[in-house]
Image (cartoon, rainbow, N blue to C red):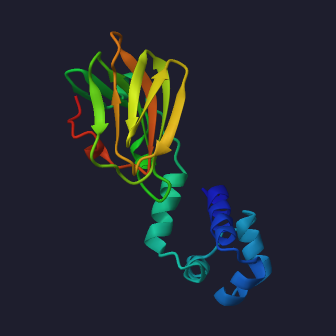
Amino acid sequence: MKTKLGALLRAIRNSRHLTIKEVAGKAGVSSSLLSQIERNRISPSLDTLLQVLEVYGVPPDKFFKDYATRSRVEIIRRGDRKVYQRKGFKYEKLCGDSQAKGNHSFNAFFLELAPGQLRGDAKNGHLGRELGIVVKGSAQLVFGEESYEIHKGDAVSFFSQIPHVIQNSSDQVFQAYWVVTPADGEDYFGEKTT
């Protein structure tokens, strides 16, 4: 826990383009103390931590929420994946719930489309980006007014704000790993877990 606390505080300071001296002066602590905290030589008192967070403009509840999210490794075993399924398509959720929260959230899935099936919305896009890696079959990606064929081994990425649809127009099952950021939550599918 201590190692990640110092690294997270340093990352916040660097993202705000502040020097240790500037933060220490505003927080009313010594530069030496702040440097030792960031290098995990010492742990800050709660009062000191709150003073530093105030300089950064980060509410304590948000800091601890992000800290808890960043300090976990989640392993989703093959047999424990959440599966969203309806006739003709299936999503298997590949990432843990903590990855779908916070500022840098994402969802990762294993997507399977039966021949003739499609997923997406031809009229509306959504915030974020998507990345797909095709592992089996081929499909057509309709992105706005343009259309692309994607095949086994291809990787495709795009801004999700443009309406988009993936359609399996072949006679084989289409399978791909798919990542969406930021996470839209489970409503992204409109499906119930099976």
User: Residue at (67%, 60%) from the top-left corner?
Assistant: 7
**Location of residue 94 (image quadrant):** top left
User: Residue at (22%, 28%) from the top-left corner?
Assistant: 194
Q: Residue furthest front?
A: 145
Q: Residue furthest right?
A: 32
From the viewer's perspective, is residue 107 above or below residue 32? above
Residue 125, x across and y down, in percent:
34, 49
From the viewer's perspective, is residue 74 above or below residue 100? above
Residue 183, x across and y down, in percent:
40, 49
User: Residue at (45%, 62%) from the top-left corner?
Assistant: 65
Q: Residue furthest top?
A: 171
From the viewer's perspective, is residue 73 above or below residue 116? below
**Location of residue 193 (image quadrant):** top left
Quadrant placement of the N terminus:
bottom right
Left or right: 29 in relation to 102 = right
Which one is nearer the viewer's eye here, 51 or 143? 143
Residue 142, x across and y down, in percent:
37, 34
User: Residue at (64%, 67%) from the top-left corner?
Assistant: 9
